[in-house]
Image: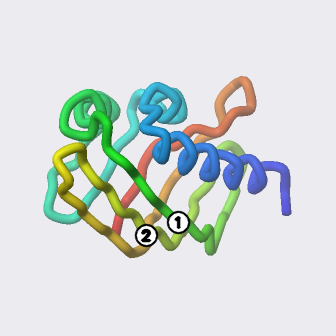
Amino acid sequence: MSSDEQAIRTWLNDWLRASAKGDSETMLAMLTDDMVFLVPGQPPFGKKEFKAAWDGPMKGACVESKADLEECVVSANTACTRTRLAVAITTPDGKVSRAKGYTLSFFRKQADSRCCSLATRIC
C-alpha cells in the first residue's frame, strides 16, 4: 500500500471518528472549501451547507457508521475511492435515518501533504 493510499485510509478513519463524536469542526477542516456532496434526491451542496446542517438539525446527533474502502486509485496529487458505507443517524428528537450503499469520493493532496476530500457522490 502506498503512503498516499494509507493517508486516505487514515482520513476515512478520522472522518468516521469525528462524525461519531459530532465533531463538525474536525470534519470541516478535512474538506476543501470547494467540496461538493452529491446525494440522491437533493441538489448538490457544499461545505457551507454541511456546516449549517451540523450547527442546526444535526447538532447533538448520534452517528454510527461503518465504511469499507474497496478501491483507491491515486494519480499525482489526486485520488478516487470507492467505499461501501452504512450510516445510522439518530437526531436529538429520536428520529433515526439509515443509509447504506456506495460512495465515490475524490481527494486532493494539499501543499502540506494532507489529503482533503473535494467531492463525494453517495449512490
Of the residues shown, which amino acid type is indicated by label 2?
Ala
Q: CA distance from mark 1 to mark 2?
A: 5 Å
Image quadrant for the N terminus?
A: bottom right
Q: Relative to residue 66, is residue 41 drawn left or right? A: left
From where the camera sits, is residue 78 visible? no
Q: Mark 1 highlights which residue? A: 66
Return the residue nearer the eye: 24 or 82.
Answer: 24
Return the residue nearer the eye: 107 or 48.
Answer: 48
What is the x, y in percent for residue 63? 40, 52
The local crowd at label 1, few if under 14, some if 14 to 19, many if 20 or more residues have their Cα within 10 Å, is some
Q: Secondary structure at mark 1?
A: strand
Rendered view: 101 above or below 34:
below
- Quarter of the figure with residue 114: top right
Q: Relative to residue 52, is residue 7 drawn left or right? A: right
Image quadrant for the C terminus?
A: bottom left
Q: Residue at x 24, y 63 (%)?
A: 97
Labelled pair 1, 2 in contact (Cβ < 8 Å) = yes
Compare marks 1 and 2 and give the one earlier in the sequence. Answer: 1
From where the camera sits, is residue 41 visible? yes
What is the x, y in percent for residue 40? 21, 65
Of the residues shown, which amino acid type is indicated by label 1?
Lys
Q: Residue at x 24, y 61 (%)?
A: 96
Q: Secondary structure at mark 2?
A: strand
Q: Mark 2 highlights which residue? A: 86
Q: Residue at x 54, y 34 (%)?
A: 30
Circle on res. 84: none
Q: Residue at x 44, y 58 (%)?
A: 64
What is the x, y in percent for residue 120? 41, 54
Rendered view: 9 above or below 23:
below
Q: Relative to residue 122, is residue 93 drawn left or right? A: left
Q: How is colour applied across the structure in the image?
A: rainbow
- Quarter of the figure with residue 15: top right
